[in-house]
Amino acid sequence: MKKSLVALAALAATGAFAQSTVTISGNIDMSYVSAKTAAGTNFSGIASGATSTSKIIFSGSEDLGGGLSAIFRANSTIVGDRGNTFQRNANPNLGTGAAATAATNQGLAFGDRDLYIGLKGGFGEVRAGRNQSISDDNNNAGGHAGSVWTYFMANSSAQAGVNNNAFTAAPVLGAAGRIADSVKYLSPVVNGFQVQALYGFGERIGRASEGAVTEAQISYTAGPLAASYSIGRVAAAANDATTFAALATTASQASLSAASAGVKSDESRLMASYDLGVAKVNVGSYRQKIDTAGSDKAWHVTGTIPMNAWTFGATYLNVKGGDNAGNLKGYSVSARYDLSKRTNAYAFYRTMDKLSTQTSRPSAVYVGMNHAF
């Protein structure tokens, strides 16, 4: 249940009053995980955010009159199992052995998920700040929570598959869930259609194209059918690989991998779902083309079946392409039980083929609970 605080703010210049609304929302997702890593080691423990990142969100709007509103949002990750003081990188299920043992100090990362201010009206919405990438937003619309597709597309650079930077050192867009220093536009929905566009500034003096992100999407929703198509590009400046690498790891585009000099990466995604009533089917495909290399491709199909308070799901993933170390396949199965409108218990299993450089086929079982507020 969302908690709203409503206040009336006086406009001194006009003597009029405008209504402001601030909403606090979010969720806590905690689970027990038992996994075998790609390095062949075993891992078990408590993990935060297995099906939905634990977070707290402050958002609000102010009526400016004439159908225009000022809006803001600050979406911050909560490392629930460590209380935002110590984080163990518990992604061993599809990662490397190091991912099961690496640990970092991490305080509350305020606004790390997205943080923006903007305007909303008949023209749509304009947001400036740290925006969720269109690519990531598109990805999250596909498949059930915790699926092998969702995980792979969010962590693909570590898997040497789609968005592979281990072999090509190319810019990564699909794994960049948030784009810092960006402007995002969302059109109003007209006859089921909506358009989105995003531009992320590289913010390097004299090198305007370095680290720049450009994205666009068109989506359509009508009754049980939903579909979207998005395209994107990450650009790197010529002859500046070293400074780009430093920028990518320390500055505004921190979520991007270091890029080879002059290399750009183009991607496209197509997602579609249809609700049959007794079941929902979702399909998706992804393609990334790198300047100096071939294309990586991935596709998935997901089915979810609701049965009273239960929801059962399964996903199959297939990765094929020019830069990964061989084709990869994976699948996941899940079960969720809704204890209330805001609380559910879940269990899921996911696994993928191992790469030629890995010791074993990574897999993991999660059992947990998610509460939204």
Image (cartoon, rainbow, N blue to C red):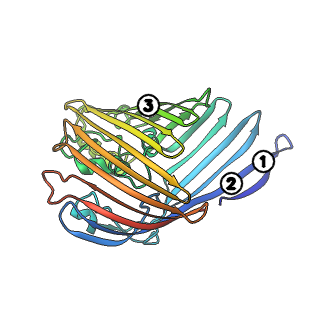
The earlier-in-sequence mark between 2 and 3 is 2
**CA gap, disc 2 and disc 3:** 33 Å
Query: Which of these two is toward me, 209 or 255?
Result: 255
Instruction: Residue 98: give x, y in percent of width and height.
Output: 23, 64
Q: Which residue is mark 2?
A: 22
- 175 displayed left or right of 360: right
Q: Which residue is mark 1?
A: 19
Query: Which of these two is toward me, 281 or 262?
Result: 281
Question: Do the residues under discs 1 and 2 have CB atoms within 8 angstroms?
Answer: no
Residue 171: quarter of image: top left
| Amino acid type at mark 1 | Gln
Quarter of the image with the C terminus is bottom right
Secondary structure found at label 3: strand
- 225 displayed left or right of 121: left
Q: Is residue 273 visible?
A: yes
Query: Which of these two is toward me, 338 or 175?
Result: 338
Secondary structure found at label 2: strand
Q: Which residue is mark 3?
A: 229
**CA gap, disc 1 and disc 3:** 37 Å
Instruction: Residue 302: give x, y in percent of width and height.
Output: 39, 45
